[in-house]
Image (cartoon, helix red, strand yellow):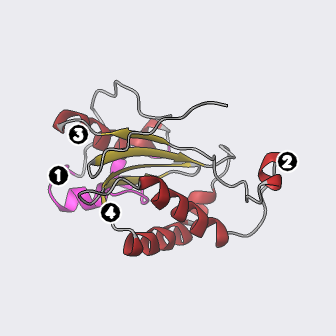
Amino acid sequence: MANYRRDRTPGGTWFFTVTLANRKSDLLIKEIEGLREAVRIVRHDWPFHIDAWVVLPDHIHAVWTLPDGDRNFSTRWRLIKSRFSHGVPRMERLSSSHSSKGERGIWQRRFWEHRIRDENDYQRHIDYVHVNPLKHGYVKQVIEWPFSTFSRCVEQGIYPPDWAGEVELNGKFGE
């Protein structure tokens, strides 16, 4: 079995990719209100700041900042995934592995995380989160995607509304 090592640095800012088991599913946008509610409840009990977030049909990219001294992003993701799964009708096909462990089989078990190292790394990942719907061909302009923090960033003056992702997307981003 693989030995997965996670960076356990307390506090800090993190980039994540969290993916459905069925990469052809549109469950996340179809059940967006359930996902929003799961995140709201978990944030109440396990606070974190959402720096950037995008929900695509089959995966999520997010940049979070954890409270000082806190390094428990895994529990937050487990709770979000669990709360979301409990609110979704049972329609997924279960593998024998998921079935034997009593799991729903909605999510891939693991997720990708990357601790943000500096301001340049932060900006590259924030841009990547926001340009993702354009990258996948869901929209012609980033502002058109409704399941993203991009509009919030436009309101805050961080991006112009016509920003269309003309950034260099070099690097590893967890897909």
Which residue, given by chain and number where applicable, does mark 1 sit on?
158
Label 3 to label 2: alpha-carbon separation: 41 Å
Label drawn at residue 123: 3
Which residue, given by chain and number where applicable, does mark 4 sit on?
48
| Identity of the residue drawn at 57% across and 60% down | 81
Which residue, given by chain and number where applicable, does mark 2 sit on?
96
Q: Amino acid at mark 2?
A: Ser
First-in-chain label (2 vs 1): 2
Q: In the image shown, does 166 or 79 lie closer to the viewer?
A: 79
Q: Viewer-nearest of labels 3 and 2?
A: 2
First-in-chain label (3 vs 4): 4
Mark 4, other Cα within 10 Å: few <14 / some 14–19 / many ≥20: some
| Residue 147: image location, x then y, percent | 43, 59
Is 129 left, or right, of 121 in this rendering? right
Mark 3, other Cα within 10 Å: few <14 / some 14–19 / many ≥20: few
Q: Viewer-nearest of labels 1 and 3?
A: 3
Q: Viewer-nearest of labels 3 and 4?
A: 4
First-in-chain label (1 vs 4): 4
| Residue 124: image location, x then y, percent | 27, 35
| Identity of the residue drawn at 33% across and 57% down | 149
Q: In the image shown, does 141 or 29 lie closer to the viewer?
A: 29
Q: Viewer-nearest of labels 2 and 1?
A: 2
| Identity of the residue drawn at 64% across and 65% down | 85
Q: Amino acid at mark 3?
A: Gln
Judged from the image, the secondary structure of the residue bearing numbered disc 3 is: helix
Judged from the image, the secondary structure of the residue bearing numbered disc 4 is: loop
Q: In the image shown, does 128 or 137 lie closer to the viewer?
A: 128
Label 1 to label 4: alpha-carbon separation: 20 Å
- Which residues fall within the magenta stretch? 138-160
Is 95 left, or right, of 15 in this rendering? right
- Is 51 above or below relative to 133? below
